[in-house]
Image: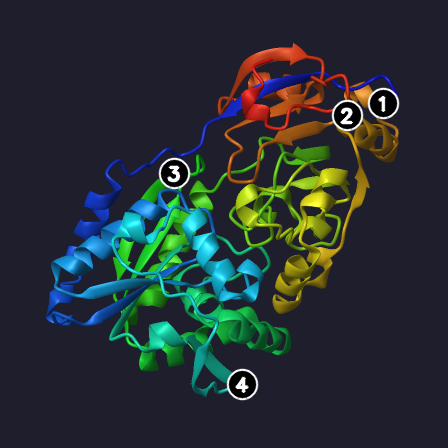
Amino acid sequence: MSDYPHIFRVRQSFPSTRIEDIAKEVDAQLQTLSLGDTVEPGQTVAITVGSRGISKIHQIVKAIVDHLKGLGAQPFIVPAMGSHGGATAEGQREMVETLGVTESWCGCPIRSSMETEIVCQAAEGFPVHFDRNAYGADHVVVCGRVKPHTNFVGDIESGLMKMMLIGLGKHEGAKIYHRAIRDYNFAQIVRSVAQEVLAKCHILAGVAVVENGYDETAKIAAVRPDEFEQREKGLLQLAKQWMPRLPFDTGHILLIDEIGKNISGTGMDTNVVGRKFGCHKAGPDELPNIQNLVIRSLTEQTHGNATGVGLAEFCRSRVLQQCDVAITRLNCYTGGHAIGAMMPLDYQTDREILDVTMPLIGLTEPPDAKLMWIHNTLDVAECECSVAYLDEARQRSDLEIIREPCPLPFDSDGNLPNDLRTWSG
């Protein structure tokens, strides 16, 4: 097939609230909690770090460490990421360090272990697990990003509450909690377990992060333990208002340069690509509605974990080569979502994928196909769009056309640039 749509580059306009001085804001927020009234000199404080690529997470964690040191405490870092990192202590430590959170940078130890303490039985009849190192500390600070969950919907989704379950529950906790969610629901289990953790696991404070649509830190909130649920509800509403979105609600093909656990729990954020409520299609009334997802690569930071690859119809063959099948399957089994580990149809080149995909879009001729091309689901402020969207883009005040239409930039092998951001057109 020789006919492909021409593409133009568009820049989106998102709310741009942003914190300039991360360390200053973290310290100011923690000052409001007067932690010195609770923390005694010499006491240990565990600080959670998850697997997500939260913007400036290394700066945020270091600022928490510095504040606690200023109180005379002895802080340390614990990976809080369920079964990620291959469900091994070494793998989780490596993931934390990949995010820039190292002992030398933060000035405190990293204590990584998959061992947990069973602190009690939840009301629903299953054990409540908690990271052993964190449980042995005098206090715990829960740090995490608040955002819409990729599978569940409610007034509490991803954030501090979930971190206390799936993150600090480690592999054993994540397994049992996801099983319980299938019998009950996310809202009930997250509240049930969080209630026990808050009562029994020395939670000192939370540091909640909300990002804007440009993957920048927009808000940092220090939260008292008894206010976790109330504050998180409000922060989730902000996160939903500020989250990135595709520029158009419908499409035949979406090319995604990379997916990975540092991007989203499902590798790509289903709130962005529109597979939150349906398998290989959007759910009823779900937007965006994209017919075919194409994954072009895995991030280096995901360490072979291709969780979420099963949501796509097509991928470059190199995705399969980059994938650690055992780690991917383990993570998906733990999360109760086996589909996420299933492999798409793979082809060596982008051209081959498009040649196969174009006849699947109905009676629309290939030059008129609705195609979008993004780097990843955290980075959609600028993206490539096919000319089928051009008239609408010219009429919208939230979109700026920054490059006029041109052919798809295939190289001699039939591939597009690995990173659309590096291609100037």
Do the residues under discs 2 and 1 have CB atoms within 8 angstroms?
yes
- Name the front one of labels 2 and 3: 3
Image height of 350 relative to 213, above or below:
above
Precedes in sequence: disc 2 or disc 3: 3
Query: Mark 4 sits on what residue?
Result: 126
Q: Is residue 373 left or right of residue 226?
A: right
3D distance between C-alphas at marks 4 and 3: 38 Å
User: In x, y percent, where is residue 345?
Assistant: 82, 44
Query: Mark 2 sits on what residue?
Result: 369
Q: Secondary structure at mark 3?
A: loop
Tell me which amino acid carries mark 4: Phe
How packed mark 2 is, by other alpha carbons closer than 10 Å (few <14, some 14-19, many 20 or more), is many
Do the residues under discs 4 and 1 have CB atoms within 8 angstroms?
no
- Name the front one of labels 4 and 2: 4
3D distance between C-alphas at marks 2 and 1: 6 Å
Q: Secondary structure at mark 1?
A: loop
User: In x, y percent, where is residue 396?
Assistant: 54, 22
- Name the front one of labels 4 and 1: 4
Do the residues under discs 1 and 3 have CB atoms within 8 angstroms?
no
Tell me which amino acid carries mark 2: Ala
How packed mark 3 is, by other alpha carbons closer than 10 Å (few <14, some 14-19, many 20 or more), is some
Query: Mark 1 sits on what residue?
Result: 365
Precedes in sequence: disc 4 or disc 1: 4
Do the residues under discs 2 and 3 have CB atoms within 8 angstroms?
no
Q: Is residue 338 left or right of residue 80?
A: right
Q: Is residue 190 left or right of residue 416?
A: left
3D distance between C-alphas at marks 2 and 3: 32 Å
Image quarter of the N terminus? top right
Query: Mark 3 sits on what residue?
Result: 216
